Amino acid sequence: MDYSGYLLNHTQKLAIDLNDYHEKSKCITQKGDIYAIDPIPVLTETGDGSLNALWDGISADTTENLIGKWCGDLLQIVDKLPLDYNVINCCFAEVLSKMRYCYYTFGVDKENFLLMDTDGNRFKGAKLNIFLRRGPLCYIEVKKTEDRIAFHPVV
């Protein structure tokens, strides 16, 4: 999918900037493939299946409160944002793959905490319980051995 333009929700007069979504939601597999969770199935789901993708936790930017909130709404992808639509923040990022992406893209700071951007901001993540409630946000300490990179949450 080309992550440009806007995903419009005509029913609620809301929009998601698809480029912004993709940048916030980028992850990397163990094999090194970069991906992002497609937002439409998550926004329109009816059975809480997205919890399976987020089972290990989420990045602090993840908007789990939007899961299923666009179910039954009229959606469209357009190049230009209509004037009367509100752009909302949207991100769906599973914590392990997102941490891996951040590690290979931004690295760690001088105290070995995972960075989330080029400005030196530390990555934050959280666990979700079965009711989609977040646990405490944690920074991630990175410990590297010869054959493994381990991520350790620090409240």
Image: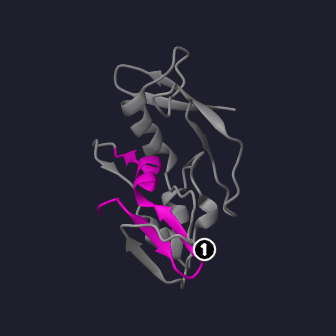
Q: Nearer the viewer, residue 65 or 16?
A: 16
Q: Residue at x 57, y 48 (%)?
A: 61
Provide residue 31's location: percent of width, then percent of height.
Answer: 28, 43
Residue labelled with disc 1: 69
Provide residue 30's location: percent of width, then percent of height.
Answer: 33, 42
- Tell me the amino acid under the disc marked 1: Lys
Provide residue 57's location: percent of width, then percent of height.
Answer: 57, 49
Provide residue 68's location: percent of width, then percent of height.
Answer: 57, 73
Magenta highlight on residue 20: yes
Residue closest to the far top: 110
The coloring applied to the image is one colour
Q: Residue at x 70, y 47 (%)?
A: 135
Image quarter of residue 67: bottom right
Q: Is residue 80 above or below residue 101?
A: below
Image quarter of residue 129: bottom right
Magenta highlight on residue 15: yes
Q: Residue at x 56, y 76 (%)?
A: 70
Q: Nearer the viewer, residue 61 or 114?
A: 61
- Dot 1 falls on a residue whose secondary structure is loop
Q: Nearer the viewer, residue 64 or 53?
A: 64
Q: Is residue 46 above or below residue 110?
A: below
Q: Which residues are magenta?
A: 1-29
Q: How many marks?
A: 1
